Amino acid sequence: MIDKPQILVDLQEKIKAHTAIIGVVGLGYVGLPFAVEKAKVGYQVLGIEQNPQRADRVNMADNYITDIKDEDLKEVVSSGKLKAVLGFERVTDMDVIVICVPTPLTKNLTPNLSYIESVTYAIAQQLRPGQLVTLESTTYPGTTDEVMRPVLEQISGLKQGKDFFLAHSPERVDPGNKRYTTKNTNKVVGASDPASLEVAMLFYQQTIDHVVPVNSAKAAELVKVFENTFRAVNIALVNELALLCDRIGLNVWEVLDAANTKPFGIMPFYPGPGVGGHCIPIDPHYLEWKAKEVNFNTHFIALAGEINRSMPIFVREKARRALNELGLAPAKSQVLVIGTAYKKDLGDWRESPAIMVINYLLEDKMTVTYHDPYVPEIEVAGKTFSSLPLIDETITSADLVIIATDHSQIDYVNLVAKAKSVLDTRGVTRHLDCNHDKVTLL
Ligand code: SAJ
């Protein structure tokens, strides 16, 4: 860029010198790790968090995100480099504002942009020349340019690319992944004007090893939603295979294990009790909704969602059959569920398929208990359940044990040995040296 506006040069200097003040809106599993990374390299970071308990925990360096090292949080909080605040009063002091707020779905699977809209409105009130705003939340293509930009420009009277800068850089966090962190996960950045793209690239390059530019915010938004759609569709494919194998009496795990021996052109996905978390079951429907605006039906997304949402019902069916083989009526049965988190080795049980399974078991009047080393308590159908200790008594008193989440630390050999019958929805027992006659695989 030849005649760079001075405000761009000044902002770039602050970013390079690490004297820029960074605002991170939303201190969840995306925002807090990002804030810590920025504070670790010396930036002054202000986290804006609407949940007072969370803000307090950050300011006391009381870590609540498993992917963050406790000592890192302690270091940046005690040095004063990271501080959490509740409101938007300090936005004017910030040079860069990174938005990491949730993008959930409504009950009818349509986008709920209320968090993004309210945060954008609050920022717009304080926006000043020379600031960079980036959106990290996963959303449909067009949110940054069509929802955020008009609000920021109209309320502040400033122009994107001339007075302030606006970009989209989708988060790529795989909760629980020990190998890929905020720092070494390639990051896509897109903006709809060259100055915004240039300064956003520079900003992310300060703490991320490889930053990938695309030519618009829309492209960056679509990259992310495509990534999650790719996973949702492939998970649905193997879930559909599991449903078919159940009909034709084949072992889907044997088929997939053999298929995955192909050294090229295949990628392992496995069936399960459903698809949980705040991304895969949700994000593809943002794209589905946007596509309808141009009268385009994203068939794969719709079908994948339908199949993945049907899996908890399939597990209920398999549980009924397993109890039937024991000559037990569901209403007179005790079922122990192992694992309620949405995926292994973490404690997040939001949108967890295990919770949907438990809901169905309760509908069938089964007596349900659970054990999850990461989840001390759950709420299902208005009832609160506490995780039972995984002692032999807990196992032997159940008529059926359902493995819903395959946490690594569970002793599955002992579990099968002590259980009357096991329904393994994750295939975690399939290669173990245990009594497979007692185990029904999904
Ligand atoms: N699941 C299956 N079978 C599979 C893989 C996953 O049933 O073969 C289930 C899991 O048990 C879980 C759900 O699908 O319930 C989602 O699992 P996930 O690991 O794909 O989803 P997240 O939400 O924990 O993390 C994903 C990231 N995961 C990976 O790339 C491995 C990535 O897609 C995104 O960066 C992240 O969501 C996000 O924040 O969008």
Image: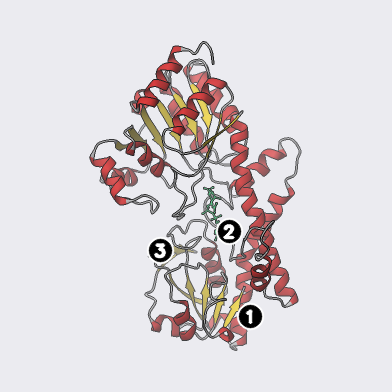
**Which residue type does callout 1 highlight?**
Arg
Whether residue 79 is visible, yes or no, is yes
CA gap between label 3 and label 1 equals 28 Å
- Assign the N terminus to one quadrant of the image: top right
Q: Name the residue under label 3.
A: 375
Kindly identify the residue that appears in the image at 60 percent across and 28 percent down.
Answer: 146
State the image coordinates of residue 101 (x, y, percent, origin top left): 47, 40
| The quarter of the displayed image where residue 83 is located | top left
Question: Relative to 4, does residue 123 appear above or below in the rendering?
Answer: below
Q: Mark 2 points at which residue?
A: 275
Left or right: where does residue 172 sit relative to residue 285?
left
**Which residue type does callout 3 highlight?**
Val
> Which label's residue is closer to the chain start, 3 or 1?
1
Kindly identify the residue that appears in the image at 52 percent across and 72 percent down.
Answer: 403
Whether residue 110 is visible, yes or no, is no
Label 2 near ligand 1 (CB < 8 Å):
yes
The kind of secondary structure element at disc 3 is loop
> Which label's residue is closer to the chain start, 3 or 2?
2
